[in-house]
Structure formats: C-alpha cells, structure tokens
Image (cartoon, grey):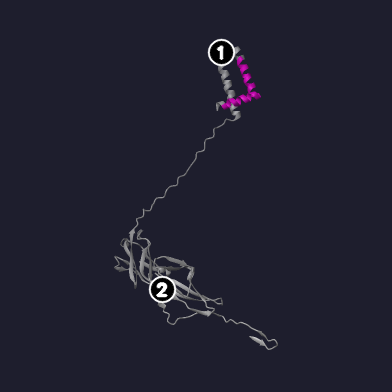
Amino acid sequence: MCQVNTDPMKSLSGHLDVVVPPDILNHPDHNLEEGVSTEGGSISLVCSATGLPEPKVQWRREAGKDIILRAESREKQALKSVEGEKLTLSNVHRTDMGGYNCIASNGVPPSVSKRFDVYVNFPPTIKAVNQLVGAPLEREVTLECFVEVYPKPLNGWYRNEGNIKLHNGMKYNISEVMINLYTWHLNLTIRELNKSDFGAYSCSSVNALGKSETRIRLQELRLPPKSTTTATPHLYTSTKPRRKQQLSYNKGLNEVVRAKETHFSMQQENDVIGSGSANSDNVGANVESGTVNRIINGAEGKLRIIKLLKYIL
C-alpha cells in the first residue's frame, strides 16, 4: 500500500500474484518395474506435478491410441485422455504396451510432460501363414509364421519333429522382422528344392515364460509338362468371286448379225429344196436382211440388241 500523509490522507493499494509454471517431480523411490506386468495383471503410473496455480495432470497415449480401462466385470472403456496424477491399468493386455505421456499444465506456459513405458510379459504364441505349402522341384519356396511374445524371444526353424535345427547357408535363408514391441515375422527360404526337402518343418519361439511352435508341411507340386511343339498359325483366306465376262458391244453386235444372216441363209436353202420357189424366197430373205440392217443401224435396233445381249448372257 502506498500512503500520502495529507489532510485528508491519501493511499493506494495494489495486489501482486506470483505464478510458477508447472514442473513434474521425479520420485527417488520410483521403480522402473512399476510399468511392467504379466498379462492379466495391473500397472499403476504416478505423475506428481508442482506449480502456481496448482497444475492439472492429464494422461494421453502415444500415437493417438486409446487408453483402455478394464473393470473386473471385463467391461472396458476406450478413452483418449484420463485426468489425475495416478493412472491404473487393470487386467492388462499385450495391446496395452507402449508409451503413456503425463502432461501437466496450469495456464502458465510452458506445459510439461513425461513419458512412462508400459510392458506386458507373456509367453509366445505362433501362427503359420499356411500350414500346407506346395512347391515344384528345383525351385525355391518361403515358409512364414508370426510370433507374438514379450520379452524378446529366441526364434528358430527345425526339421524332423524338431530334432534338426536349420541355419543360414547355401540351402537355407532365415530372417525375422520385428513388426512392433511384441510381434515378429519369421521367414525360412529353401533353395533348389529336391525330393529330400519335402516333409514337416517347425517354427519355434521360446522366452522366460514359455515355448511355442507350429508345424508347416511342405509337399511337392507337380507341374504339367512343358509343350515342345509350336502351333501353326491358321491363315484365313478369302476367294474373290470371278467377274462374269461381259461381251463388248461391238463383238455382241457382230455375233447377232452373223446369227441372223445364218438363220436367213438356212431358211433360203430350205425353201429352195422344199418348194422350188427360190425367187420368191430370195426376195423375202432380202427383205428380212434389210430389216435386220435397219434395226441394227437405228436407235430402236440398238436398244433391242442390248436387251438381246442381256438375255443371252
């Protein structure tokens, strides 16, 4: 308060608030194993924060995954965030594994966060991609299986009821890929298959909590023989229709004239032999011959000749 001794006295009061950004405390007695449990157990995570005003604590899971809260009645809730300093996970499952972030904020920047890791231990379970695989001789084939297990297992491939362990080399190629914290993809590639390679194979995984294996049977796949003959391509041919030969106009006209003259000549001979009236017949023949010439030379005759040619052809 500021005061001035006058008559009357004057004073001015002010109010000061001290704020402190949030901070997450590290517990000296914090045990890293608190975030580890066997499948079906419980895990409790504690995150204490200080600051003025008092910070609010919120839990979120990494990669935007849901936090699964299970009850004894096996009912479960999937939540994006959980409020409070303590997060309890009951009846934990392998899918609960991963990172959980504790975020403390009180309106005074900056907000702070801390990561907690959750691990769930369980014995291995194996599933073969195909339990029966067929492949032809002199080829290569890949056998596959998936393993879910934590902590990290010892994986392997075996033959003859698990008595012979297979190793990388010219004949076999063995590989494994880690998909997530608890899932593995195992592969066995067999090269240059022969008769002795067919039979049973085992994919095995073992850790401190147990052992599991699955069998895959490899059998010969008989391919049809390759064809050595080549098919002759069929050629499609089409026969062009023969064009009907057409007589030229002049040639047809000459043949018609000769046919007419022959007809009249024969008629004259028959009349001379039959009746002896050669004179009268010759006159008739001359008349007919003249008529033919007129027909041929005239326009009307040309049309008749064309019709006659069409009839003959």
Q: What residue appears at the point 33 percent right and 59 percent down from the top-left corner?
A: 219
Q: Is residue 239 above or below residue 275?
A: below
Q: Is residue 99 visible?
A: yes
User: Which disc, if any, is residue 272?
Assistant: 1
Q: Quadrant of residue 157?
A: bottom left
Label 2: which secondary element: strand
Q: Amino acid at mark 1?
A: Val
Specify the farthest residue to the bottom. Answer: 5
Quadrant position of the C terminus in the picture: top right
Q: Position of residue 83 (x, y in %)?
A: 49, 72
Specify the farthest residue to the right. Answer: 7
Q: Position of residue 222 (x, y in %)?
A: 34, 55
Asked whether residue 239 is drawn in magenta, I would say no
Q: Is residue 174 above or below residue 4?
A: above
- Badge 1 density bin: few <14, some 14–19, many ≥20, Cα 10 Å: some
Task: Name the residue tied to disc 2.
Answer: 43
Disc 2/disc 1 C-alpha distance (Å)? 145 Å
Residue numbers of the magenta segment:
284-310
In the drawing, does residue 179 fall left or right of residue 209?
Answer: right
Q: Position of residue 125 (x, y in %)?
A: 36, 66
Q: Position of residue 186 (x, y in %)?
A: 38, 67
- Closer to us: mark 2 or mark 1? 2
